[in-house]
Amino acid sequence: MREERRKFPREPISVEVGVRHTDWPLIKAKSFDISVEGIRLFLPKKFPKDKVMELEINLPLPPVVTRGKVVWVKEVETKGGKFFQTGIKFTEVKPEDKARIEVFTQTRQK
């Protein structure tokens, strides 16, 4: 098994996420995992590495709105077609939202 090298390991939690970018309309996605530093999404479109986007993460009210940068993309073939696992590093997170993400991941972990 691969050793986790992240400072804040991502927890395998699925939540709905709205992804916005000036080039495309709102895209609805699901997360694979999340931490206070980033999120892995399952997207129907491929975003290029280093693309910055706005994310609306649907945690218990209110949603967390933040910005993130694409750090990696992996193409995945499914019965429903081609999708893209996308690793995103948060670039702008308010301290109170970071705390909410941390509490949410810790409580869902138990």
Image (tube, rainbow, N blue to C red):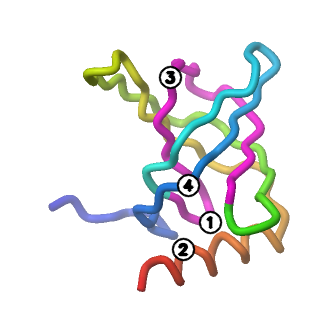
Q: Mark 2 and mark 1 in contact? Answer it, CB < 8 Å.
A: yes
Q: Residue at x 41, y 86 (%)?
A: 110
Q: Which residues are drawn in magenta?
A: 34-58
Q: In screen coordinates, is 26 left or right of 45?
A: right
Residue 50 included in the magenta stretch of the image = yes
Q: Secondary structure at mark 1?
A: loop
Report the mark closest to the observer, 3 or 1: 3
Q: Which residue is mark 4?
A: 15
Front-lying residue, 11 or 25: 25
Q: Which residue is mark 1?
A: 36
Q: In screen coordinates, is 39 left or right of 66?
A: left
Q: Position of residue 60 (x, y in %)?
A: 70, 68
Cα distance between the residues tagged 4 and 3: 16 Å
Label 3 amino acid? Pro
Q: Position of residue 76 (x, y in %)?
A: 31, 25
Q: Position of residue 13 (x, y in %)?
A: 46, 62
Q: In screen coordinates, is 79 left or right of 37?
A: left
Badge 4, how many Cα within 10 Å: few under 14, some, many 20+? some
